[in-house]
Amino acid sequence: MNDLATFIQTTTLVDTHEHLNSEASFVERGPDVLQDLFDNYITADLVVAGAAPAAVQRLIDKHDRDIEARFAGVRAAWERCRHTGYGEATRLIARLVYDMDEITVDAVAAAEPRNRALRQPGGRLYLLRDLARLDHVQIDNFNWPCAPDTADPDFFLHDISWVNFCEARIEPDKIYTETGVTVSDLASLRAAMEQIFERYGTLAVAVKTQHAYTRTLEWREQDDASAESSLQRHLAGYPLSEAERLCLGDWCLARGVELAISYDLPFKIHTGYHAGHSRMPIDWLRAGLLCDLLTCYPQARFILMHTAYPYSAELIALAKHYPSVYMDMCWAWSIDPRNACEFVRRTIHSVPAHKLFVFGGDSFWPSASVAYATQTRAHLTRALQAEIDEGLLNEYEAIAFAERFMRTNQEDCFDLARTRAALAAA
């Protein structure tokens, strides 16, 4: 390896996005080998490649002990998608976690002792910190609480989830249980939001929403009277029209951004591609639909995720234009590795160097994050080496970009020391 490849392989990555299951879930209810290999984004490719959804569900059902039958149901589809980005990640799990040269029934059976050895207390941390070589992970577990993780509070950091609010899914009972506030009007809803931040704002590393799965990313500033009307209909049990739902969701998103500003927390927003298969309203996904929000809140730090694939050029334009916009390549290396390489290269020549974060595993099980981190290192090396080969960068400059993209930019954007100190005090 040359100096660039060695640097990228040995430098710890900051992991800005995961959905990791808890230590207890991993130890007590974690995956068997087949589930560990395939219970990630490859399930969508398998269905698109012709596997029956029921066969895919059986594949990742660890309670079914017939390994041969589980794998047989997807074997043909697996051969068709093994070289996609998702397929590459699955093969990396096999090789790096289970020492498999090829995924076969015999190899899966032989790997069971390794699986049991990993699913012990500390195994999740070992896979992420030692095997994937991550500095820390930032977890969105779709909840408001950001309590210290006893497995390692310095390593496992958490986002405050804002997705329910952005989708206008206001749950008064849940809010009361969490905050003690009875939501009866817009003022009490605002008070409940403030209470969530008062409890968890100092413990969180960021705020996160992925509402593009259920509504357009397009945001419009909403007045209190319109939002109040939508909220009252919702609290009375009436179904909201799409316009009412967007009105209340946009109002809630704005309040979340304002609270994030006051607590000096970055605000992460899913843009672009949908996980899963067979339903993706493509006109919801463009990062450019957020322009009014970006313009309205210039003092915020917006982290727009997943390269907004397939609208990656549009996201680069936003990061070039708006000082408040950062780009997070979490998940992007497995969606489309070639596009991700090109994204890095375009960013170097169009956007200030502090704007890009290259890694987040976006996974529920740690073995998948090992694979996605490995993909990131390999393809980032290819992207930066191509810059050297074309005479656009020298090796020293390429290494400097690698260090920025892998960790320095994230350390500058997130106040990790403050978050860790608050978690220690808690």
Image: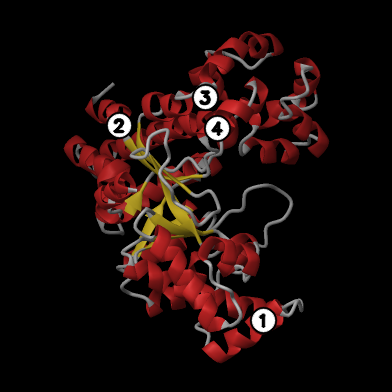
Q: Nearer the viewer, residue 221 or 1?
A: 221
Q: Which residue lies at the image location 57% right of the left edge and 17% below the top edge?
A: 115
Q: Is residue 8 above or below residue 263?
A: above
Question: Which numbered circle lies on residue 243?
Answer: 1
Name the spot of residue 359 as percent of width and height, x first: 40, 42
| Residue type, label 1 | Ala
Quadrant location of the N terminus in the rendered image: top left
Q: Earlier in the sequence, mark 2 or mark 1?
A: 2
Q: Nearer the viewer, mark 1 or mark 3?
A: 1
Q: Earlier in the sequence, mark 2 or mark 4?
A: 2
Q: Is residue 154 above or below residue 322?
A: above
Residue 349 occupies quadrant: bottom left
Q: Nearer the viewer, mark 4 or mark 1?
A: 4
Within 10 Å of disc 4 (Cα), the crowding (few <14, some 14-19, many 20+) is: few
Question: Which numbered circle lies on residue 24?
Answer: 4
Name the spot of residue 32 as percent of width and height, x first: 65, 22
| Residue type, label 4 | Ala
Within 10 Å of disc 2 (Cα), the crowding (few <14, some 14-19, many 20+) is: some
Report how far apart the C-alphas of labels 2 and 3 lie in the structure: 18 Å
Q: Which residue lies at the image location 30% right of the left edge and 51% below the top edge?
A: 422
Q: Nearer the viewer, mark 4 or mark 3?
A: 4
Report how far apart the C-alphas of labels 4 and 1 lie in the structure: 41 Å
Q: Is residue 315 above or below residue 62?
A: below
The residue labelled by disc 3 is 92
Q: Secondary structure at mark 3?
A: helix
| Residue type, label 2 | Ile
Q: Nearer the viewer, residue 2 or 190?
A: 190
The residue labelled by disc 2 is 8
